[in-house]
Structures are given as C-alpha cells and as structure tokens.
Amino acid sequence: MSERKNLCVLVALHRWEGSLADQLGEDEARHASERCANRIERAISAQGGKLLSLDSDETVAVFERSDAGVQAAIEALQRIRNLPPLRGARQPVRLGLHYGILDDTGTDAEPASGEGVTVARQLASLCENEQALVSGTAVMVTSSATRNLISAQALSGPNWARLEWPVYAIGQRTGLVTSIPAAARLTQRLRIRHQHDVLFVEELRPVVLLGRELGNDVNIMDPRASRQHARIERRREGFVLFDQSTNGTFVTNQEGKEAFVRRDSVVLQGRGYIGLGKTPDPNAVDAIRYQLED
C-alpha cells in the first residue's frame, strides 16, 4: 500500500543526447551519464537523502527537510563541475527540487509518483546544463541560512509565468530571499486553533500539516482522518487548503456555507471550521477553527 507524505523531492536528469551523444558514441555517452549519476548519488547520501531510483538517465531522491535537498543539489553540481569536460561540453546535468506530496516511494514495477516528483521533474527539464532550480514551495520551508544559497528573485519569463509556483535558481545568490516575491507578499496571517493549541500560517511558518499521524502540526485522532490528510499553504492567492486524503475535507465558513474537497484545494477566507473526513462540528472538542488576521 502506498503512503502519501510531504517530502522534498530531488530529480536529476543526466542523459547525454542529441549531437553530443552522437559525437561520443553510445557506449561513451552511457558511461558519462553513469559517472554523473554516481556523483549525484554520493551527494544525496552525504545529506541523508533516500534514493528512490537511479539509472543512466535520471535520479530521484527524497529528503525529510528541504534544507538537505538544497545542500545535496549544490554538492552534486560541485562534484559534476569537477569532472573534466567531454569534447569541450558541460555535463548535461539538470536538477529540480520541490516540496510536495509523494504518493509512493516506488518499486521496480511502479516508479515513485505524486506531485513532488512531477513538479521536480518539470523543473529539471527547464534547467540549463549544470543548473539546479527549486520551487517557491520548497524555499518557503527552508531555513534562513539555506535561503542564502538561493537566488533572491524568482525567475521571470514565459517559461516561468505559466507555472503555479515561483521558481528560484540554487547557488546564484544576489540578496536576501523571502518566502515569496515582495510584490506578492501577504500581509495577513491565518490563525488555527485546535483544542488548547494555537498556531499561525505566516511568513515564518508558511506550511501547516493536518492529519492522524503524530508528526502533523494539527493531530486529529479520528479514524476518518488520513495519516497525512491535508496541508494549508501560504500562497500568492491567499491561504490554500490542499486535501490529500481518502475521505476528503469539509470547510464551513462564518456564514454556514460548506465546501467539500477531495484531492483538490480551496482558498480559506474569513473564518470558519475545518473537518477532516467529516462535517465540522463547532461544539466538538477536536474542532479545528481558522481565522484570517491582519
């Protein structure tokens, strides 16, 4: 059975193809790709990552923390750049990182899948050779020290405008990076109250996890709640709840109107209640209350 979990996913593409591959020949091109893959694997291992798949074309790994993923990408590029160029060309290595859902850790029959892998692979495909890109979602859950290793401004242009998240280059530091671009920065925060606990979704804590598993920020001991049920993210458009559960999430606003999402998202507005796998009861002991605050 697959397990859905929020992780930092790194996808590295390292296949020699096109005219460069033709010049090298099939055997030499495969050897060059494998040599790059070996160095990427060492960087992943050094930062405590878990390798999900490795072949001559692509490497996929996951990290519990985005900080480790960024450090692994930097180390991998350093190792790659220390290799001698082949036929005067840079190594065709491109890395993408994203913090998101991993549906399955992968097997020989079924590779790893989920939003995290899909977005990380998309970012890697948009890279130039010997470049690493990271999504704004992954940047938001890194420490301030790691943000010093990431470009201050999101990339701009047609390729990036169509993406859901801002994208940053790793290892191209020009100033202090914030969780999201200044022009799109929210001035509000979202207060969440559960039993005696109060926490805020804000710039310093842009992602909150909800579910039955003890590692979540909001822990619900109800069999209708999934272990990794939902997450709330601070985004350009506001505070967005993403459901990733079996039974779905119910959101009731201050006017009593209810919205139901399953494997989908909803923007939280005003104030109201959140129910994991059930309609929220404002009088219940385990009620989850939310409220936007200026």
Image (cartoon, rainbow, N blue to C red):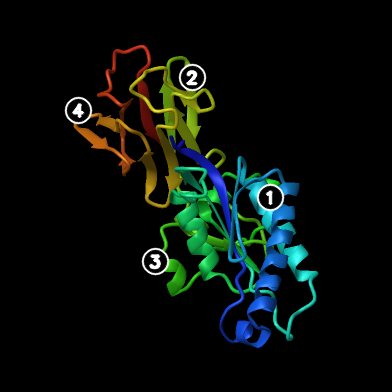
**At numbered mark 1, what does the secondary structure look like: helix, strand or loop?**
helix
Q: Going from the N terminus, do you reach mark 1 or mark 4 first?
A: 1
Circle 1/circle 4 CB separation < 8 Å:
no
The label shown at residue 256 is 4
Callout 2: few (<14), some (14-19), or many (20+) C-alpha neighbours within 10 Å? few
Quote the CA–CA distance across marks 3 and 1.
Answer: 26 Å
Q: Give the numbered dot on residue 235.
A: none
Of marks 1 and 4, the one in the foreground: 1
Task: State which quarter of the image contains the N terminus.
Answer: top left
Picture residue at 47% right of the left edge, 33% below the top: 209
- Residue 48 location (% of width, % of height): 70, 43
**Disc on the earlier residue, 4 or 3:** 3
Q: Which residue is mark 1?
A: 146
Is disc 3 surrounded by few (<14), some (14 to 19) or many (20+) residues within 10 Å? few
Helix or strand or loop: what does disc 2 sit on? strand
Q: Which residue is mark 2?
A: 197
In the picture, the disc for residue 162 is 3
Gap in Å between the C-alphas at discs 4 and 2?
A: 24 Å
Badge 4: residue crowd in 10 Å (few <14, some 14–19, many ≥20): few
Q: Is residue 294 visible?
A: no
The Cα atoms of the two marked residues, 2 and 3, are separated by 38 Å
Q: Amino acid at mark 3?
A: Arg
**Residue 60 sits in which quadrant?**
bottom right
The image quadrant that residue 74 belongs to is bottom right
Q: Residues within 10 Å of mark 1 (few under 14, many from 20)?
A: some
Amino acid type of the residue that numbered disc 2 sits on in the rendered structure: Asp
